[in-house]
Image: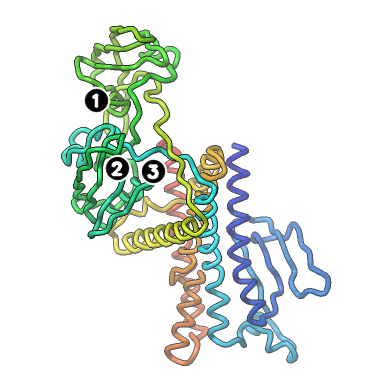
Amino acid sequence: MLLTILAFALALGLLIAIHEYGHYRVAVACGVKVLRFSIGMGKPLLRWRKKGADTEFVIAALPLGGYVRMLDEREGAVAPEERHLAFNNQPLRSRAAIVAAGPLANLLLAVALYSVVNWLGVQAPKAVVSSPVAGSMAERAGLQAQDWVQAVQTDGERQPLRSWEDLRWELTQGALQGRDLRLEVTDTRGLHVRQVLLPLSNVQTDEVDAALMQRIGIVAPWMPAVIGEVLPDSPASAAGLLAGDTVLRVDGQSMQDGAQLRQVIQKNAQGRPQAWALERAGQPLQLTVTPQVLEGPQGPYGRIGAMIGTAPEMVTVEYGLWDGLAAGAAKTWDVAALSLRMMGKMLVGEASVKNLSGPLTIADYAGKSASLGLTQYLVFLALISVSLGVLNLLPLPVLDGGHLMYYLWEAVTGHPVSERWMQGLQRLGIGVLVLLMAIALFNDIYRLLAS
């Protein structure tokens, strides 16, 4: 819990500070007088000012935002000798640049974070697939356990894959965009190349969740059918299973990997005894295992109370200086584009609002990623930074994108949006934003209760 709180607080503080610094830095460069730079909202907890400087720096009580307060005749009287320093008296291009600088700072931070991860290198599972889900698209396409997916082809372009995460990303994008993927598959030694076509255009999904990968049939990297930790007072313990046992057959059916073994256990929704053929310390062994039947969201399923599988084969994904930077920029672009597509689909009703996540889910992911190490936490920060940048660029009043929308109107018509219209749009924007936050918080609570 403490790690989750610290990781979440650090993420919020960093992303808010970078966003507001973008506004601040460009405002100063454009000759605007900045009165206050605040990280957080509400009552100031800490405040300081550099000697001879105009700007007061503040850390406030509510860490859910921040702001840069600039000299502006719309917010108070401005001395005649300082009118040229007021934000509202700046040229349109300067005002637009100041407003856009915050979201762009978040996107640039994401590029930097992804690049650092690429340069440091990260251990990731190799893109070797486990047994496809029975009856799934992958099984029908002919994918098999221990197939190594080295590249994907879509629209005539070949994209090499470095890890399991790359494969998951391509599958997710293909499903959401309705694009068929052709997998370039070999065995684990890189021999016997063949093509496997996944007709993802038939998926027609509006959510990115575990059910999507179940429908596609590619759910986990390959792991052997080895028993891990056995829980006390469980069916596995009662049957005599021990950690390290290799499962060869269940009811005469050969077990190719841990994923297939899990499927066989879970499909035993009647709790009938199963005949297991094992290998323990090099010696064959026969046991009878009777799974416990539990009730889940999809109906009853079997469970034995033991971990199945070992750590998958790992590869080091690492880039050189320029390749890492280019890959970081490409990843930022892909994530931003995917975020915009999902928001667009939610707007027209083609995607579920269940995809929205709020502070509870973000805090949970912050703690989990931090527990996995520095590189995973940096990837999490990059993802949230992209999301924050994209969100603020939406043409929604009260957000930076809404102000840019006002400036576009001014550029086209030659005069600014009237105060009456602006006040009405601001109220509308606040209402929409509160609604989105309420939906995201509801989704957070639902996920916590369902987990």
Q: Earlier in the sequence, mark 3 or mark 1?
A: 3
Give the residue at mark 3. Answer: 163
The crowd level at tag 3 (other Cα within 10 Å; few <14, some 14-19, many 20+) is: many
Residue 63 drawn at (x, y percent): 63, 55
Q: How is the image coloured?
A: rainbow
**Front position in the image: 188 or 378:** 188
Up-down relation of residue 367 to residue 421 (above or below): above
Q: Earlier in the sequence, mark 1 or mark 2?
A: 2
Up-down relation of residue 277 to residue 228 (above or below): above
Disc 1 marks which amino acid?
Lys
Report helix, strand or loop for mark 1.
loop
Q: Residue at horizontal 82%, vertical 74%?
A: 52
**Front position in the image: 150 or 420:** 150
- Which is in the foreground here, disc 1 or disc 2? 2
Work out which quarter of the rendered image holds the N terminus and state it: top right
Give the residue at mark 1. Answer: 267
In the displayed orientation, state which residue is furthest to the left: 140
Work out which quarter of the rendered image holds the C terminus and state it: top left
- In-image side of 220 versus 55 (left or right): left
On residue 149, the disc is 2
Disc 3 marks which amino acid?
Ser
**Front position in the image: 304 or 111:** 111
**Front position in the image: 362 or 287:** 287
